[in-house]
Image (cartoon, rainbow, N blue to C red):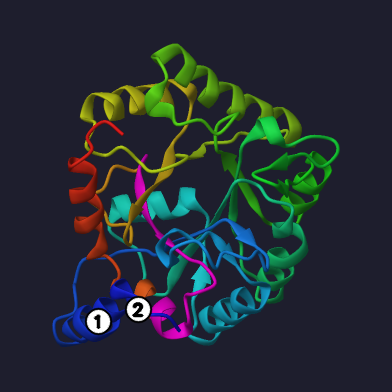
Amino acid sequence: MSFRLDRLATLYLVSPFLRLAPRSEPSVPILMYHSVSDTDETRVPAYYQTATSPVMFANQMQYLHNLGYSTINLADAARLLQKGGMTKKCAVITFDDGYADFYRHAFPELDRYGFTATVFLPTGYIGTAPVQFKGKDCLTWSEVRELRRHGMWFGSHTVTHPQLSTLDANAVKDEIANSKQTIEHNLGELVDSFAYPFAFPEVNKPFIQMLRNILVDSGYNQGVSTCIGTARPQEDRYFLRRLPVNSLDDISLFSAKLQGGYDWLHKVQYASKQLRPHS
């Protein structure tokens, strides 16, 4: 395995400290996946890789099962966090971008253990026949409906997956409201969860307030961001933190992430955004 500073610090500095002084505050790991495939990302830095091989994903799901984790949907997690009643063995599994490989590779493993997951759909790429996004086929609406019948959940990931912070308020509202309406039309049920695409501009406070207002007005009840960490009660329920996962997350690092050992990286992430504000 190639050298990774984030892995080294997590496994040999932060995690041992947490074992000596564990946090008492309740939290929930919200895992952030994208593609479950053998996509070659050798030229992509480890931190930015988004593909998880089917073999690695199967190992990670087996690990969750063996440790006695149960999975809940995002709405239940947000409610439990607000009440401070989250158990240590609950996790939320999420997938961004609506790739078809979720149906082929992720769902069978989730179903094997009775796990649920939330898939966030960029509705402009979900059709009656496969449509490609970033070079990969996306789910079709018939697959989405089948997955929903088998206990999977779906949320909005906008219509066209733009960098929302570069758009005006009306365009942001169109992306958020239209995506929600399209999913609801195709599933015949309410949709109230949202996932922010791209890096979350947490240093841009005016934009975040505008975005939150639009989410509330559009009928969403909770959402997730790309900010790193386990989700905690004091966080805004519309922008809960998540833990990125990819093929390079061996079980040692995966376990540390579940237990809060990767949360330290959010401070680094936030500091880097302050150096390039409003991005």
Q: Residue at x 37, y 63 (%)?
A: 28
Amino acid marked by disc 1: Ser
Instruction: Verify CB contact (< 8 Å) between mark 1 and mark 2.
Output: yes
**Residue 250 shown in magenta:** yes
Q: Which residue is drawn at 63% across and 25% down?
A: 181
Q: Please give left or right for residue 198 compared with residue 65 in the image.
A: left
Q: Please give left or right for residue 36 compared with residue 22 in the image.
A: right
- Residue 140 seen in the figure: yes
The stretch in magenta equals 238-255
152 is higher (above) or lower (below) than 46: above
Q: Residue 182 at what x, y percent from top left?
A: 68, 27
Query: Which label number is shown at residue 68?
Result: none
168 is higher (above) or lower (below) than 129: above
Q: Residue 39 at what x, y percent from top left?
A: 65, 64
Q: Name the residue under label 2.
A: 256
Q: In which quarter of the image is residue 156?
A: top right
Q: Which of 86 and 16 is in front in this view?
A: 16
Specify the farthest residue to the front. 43
Q: Which of 214 and 8 is in front in this view?
A: 8
Specify the farthest residue to the left. 21
Query: Which label number is shown at residue 15?
Result: 1
Q: Which is more N-terminal, label 2 or label 1? A: 1
Distance Cα–Cα, label 1 vs label 2: 7 Å
Mark 2, secondary structure of its residue: helix
Q: Please give left or right for residue 119 compared with residue 262 in the image.
A: right
Q: Which residue is drawn at 25% across and 63% down?
A: 265
Tag 1: Cα neighbours inside 10 Å, few (<14), some, or many (≥20)? many
262 is higher (above) or lower (below) than 76: below
Q: Residue 270 at what x, y percent from top left?
A: 22, 49
Indicate the quadrant containing the C terminus: top left, top right, bottom left or bottom right.
Answer: top left
